[in-house]
Image (cartoon, helix red, strand yellow):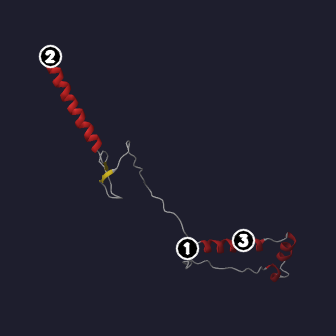
Amino acid sequence: MKHIFTAFLLSVLLLASCGGSDNSEAADSTDGENPSKSALKVAAVIAEITTSRQRILTTGTVLADEEVNLMSEISGRIESINFVEGQNVKRGEVLVKLVNDDLKAEYQKAKYEMKLQEDRERRQRK
């Protein structure tokens, strides 16, 4: 398509450049003395739509249309990944589970501390 446009543009420029003449020559040719002098020779090309067989090979980088960066508020080792790459996920869905043994231990400790404090309060009331 680019070649067709270029050929068309060149033919228009060629016709435009051949069309200009002095007023004195135009006056001479209107007298009818020499009609061959007023005729202009024009070379024209008929533009056709064709497909190009040229191939262009290049290197490049493909960028994703959409992307998400996942960042955890706390650091830790990953226990499981609960999605497949490219899969649609819903809001609030657990995507990655971290190893939480230390959190479980702290929770158990807090439960025992609470039970101890409740027992201490009960004894002091008696």
**Sooner in the amino-acid sequence: mark 2 or mark 3:** 3
Q: Taking 50 as reference, is 107 left or right?
A: left
Secondary structure category for the residue under label 1: loop
Task: Return the mark for residue 34.
Answer: none
Q: Dot 2: few (<14), some (14–19), or many (≥20) neighbours within 10 Å?
A: few
Q: Nearer the viewer, mark 1 or mark 3?
A: 1
- Residues 65 and 25: in front is 65
Residue plotted at (27% across, 37% down): 106
Q: CA distance from mark 2 to mark 3?
A: 108 Å
Q: Which residue is mark 1?
A: 57
**Sooner in the amino-acid sequence: mark 1 or mark 3:** 3
The quarter of the picture where the N terminus appears is bottom right
Q: Dot 3: few (<14), some (14–19), or many (≥20) neighbours within 10 Å?
A: few
Q: CA distance from mark 2 to mark 1?
A: 87 Å
What x and y, as percent, mark residue 47? 61, 77
**Sooner in the amino-acid sequence: mark 2 or mark 1:** 1
Q: Taking 49 as reference, is 113 left or right?
A: left
Q: Which residue is mark 3?
A: 13
Q: CA distance from mark 1 to mark 3?
A: 33 Å
The quarter of the picture where the C terminus appears is top left
Q: Nearer the viewer, mark 2 or mark 3?
A: 2
What x and y, as percent, mark residue 53? 55, 79
Indicate the amino acid at tag 1.
Leu
Task: Return the mark for residue 125.
Answer: 2
Secondary structure category for the residue under label 3: helix
Q: Dot 1: few (<14), some (14–19), or many (≥20) neighbours within 10 Å?
A: few
